[in-house]
Image: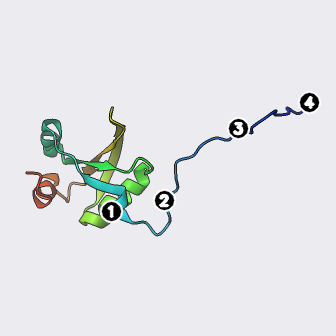
């Protein structure tokens, strides 16, 4: 097979900026998000945060567990139309999302 030769600029795949291994959790979880939908989700033991666009689900889970001393069961993420990233965090049954929301001043 013949090798492909590139003419001009080389194309490289862009990657999201890497977050260092000594993580600063306050740069990952920016602030809690509050809407009517999220208040109703509190009954299902869920809470939402606006997070860094460069973060993934594993990093978000680790950050929430370390910042708020809770155990996270699952994380779902969503990119909002304005470019922010929202993470829906479901806590384990031993922790209560409503109590955490009250502690954060959301309720």
Q: Residue furthest right?
A: 1
87 vs 103, left or right, is: right
**Distance from Cα at disc 2 to Cα at disc 1:** 12 Å
Q: In this view, which residue lies farthest toward the left?
A: 107
Structural crowding at the residue carrying mark 2, measured as other residues with C-alpha within 10 Å and reported as few (<14), some (14–19) or many (≥20): few
- Which of the numbered marks, if any, corresponds to residue 26? 1
What residue does disc 4 label? 2
Marks 3 and 1, Cα distance to the nearest angstrom? Answer: 34 Å
Mark closest to the chain's N terminus, 2 or 1? 2
Q: Residue 91: image x %, image y %?
A: 25, 53
Residue beneath disc 2: 19
Indicate the secondary structure of the residue bearing disc 4: loop
Q: Are marks 4 and 2 in contact (CB under 8 Å)?
A: no
Q: CA distance from mark 3 to mark 4?
A: 19 Å
Q: CA distance from mark 4 to mark 1?
A: 50 Å
Kindly identify which residue carries mark 3. Answer: 11
Q: Toward which corner of the image does residue 79 lie, by quadrant?
A: top left
- Contact? badges 4 and 1 (CB < 8 Å): no
Q: Earlier in the sequence, mark 4 or mark 1?
A: 4
| Sequence-first tag of 2 and 3 | 3
Residue 29, placed above or below residue 48: below
Above or below residue 34? Residue 22 is: below
- For label 3, the crowd category at 10 Å Cα-Cα, with few meaning under 14, some 14 to 19 and many 20 or more, is few
Does the CB distance between marks 3 and 1 fall below 8 Å?
A: no
Q: Residues within 10 Å of mark 1 (few under 14, many from 20)?
A: few
Going 7% across and 51% down the picture, which residue do you hit?
107
> Which residue sits at x=43%, y=51%?
55
Where is residue 6 shown, x and y percent of the image? Answer: 81, 34
Q: Earlier in the sequence, mark 4 or mark 2?
A: 4
Q: Looking at the picture, tell me which residue is in the foreground, 82 or 62.
A: 82
Q: Look at 25% across and 62% down and name the residue there.
A: 70
């Amino acid at each position: 097979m013949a090798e492909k030769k590139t003419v001009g600029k080389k194309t490289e795949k862009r990657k999201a900026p890497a977050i260092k291994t000594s993580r600063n959790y306050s740069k990952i979880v920016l602030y809690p998000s509050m809407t009517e939908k999220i208040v109703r989700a509190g009954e299902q033991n869920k809470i939402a945060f606006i997070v860094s666009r460069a973060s993934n689900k594993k990093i978000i889970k680790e950050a929430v567990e370390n910042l708020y001393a809770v155990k996270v069961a699952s994380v779902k993420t969503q990119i909002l139309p304005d470019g922010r990233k929202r993470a829906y965090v479901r806590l384990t049954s031993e922790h209560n999302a409503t109590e955490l929301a009250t502690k954060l001043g959301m309720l």
